[in-house]
Amino acid sequence: MANEEKQPALFEKGEWWDESWKGMPEFDQKDLEPYKTVYVHFESREDMDAFAKLVDQRIGANTRSIWYPEAEIGRFSDKRYIDSLPKDNEPSDVEILEAI
């Protein structure tokens, strides 16, 4: 029994992606869920228009939800991390959101 190899631990090896992700910024997912959701039913178009005026937001026949106060909805699917900034004379569509 003394010559048998010790069984490797499951958690000491690390993940397959560890090497690729060294030095990358930490991902911090903020909670974007609303505090409370309330369903509002309207008996008529006029009632819906009056409510829209009251909350100062556009509400149409296809509106599924609104935020009060009105919130800017962020889109992140078109964002990416880069490892260096483009040089001043290079054309670029890079927008700096936050410098680390």
Image (cartoon, helix red, strand yellow):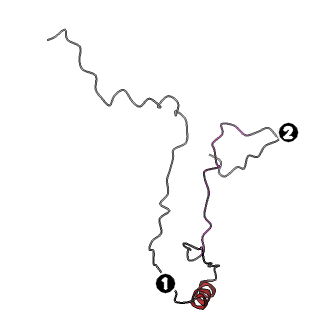
What residue is drawn where x is 36% and y is 26%? 13
Q: Determine which residue is flagged by label 1.
A: 41
Mark identifier at residue 76: none
What main secondary structure does the magenta stretch of the protein show? loop
- Left of 63 or right of it: where is 90? right
Say which amino acid is labelled 2.
Asn
Mark with earlier residue (1, 2): 1
- Left of 35 or right of it: where is 12? left
Q: Residue furthest left?
A: 1
Secondary structure at badge 2 equals loop
Up the image or down, 60 lies above or below 16; here it is: below
Q: Position of residue 53 (x, y in %)?
A: 63, 87
80 within the magenta span: yes
Up the image or down, 21 lies above or below 60; here it is: above
Up the image or down, 16 lies above or below 79; here it is: above
Q: Position of residue 28 (x, y in %)?
A: 50, 51
For this rendering, which residue is in front, 2 or 60? 60
Q: Which residues are magenta?
A: 70-85
Mark identifier at residue 89: 2
Q: Position of residue 60 (x, y in %)?
A: 63, 78
Q: Residue furthest top?
A: 3
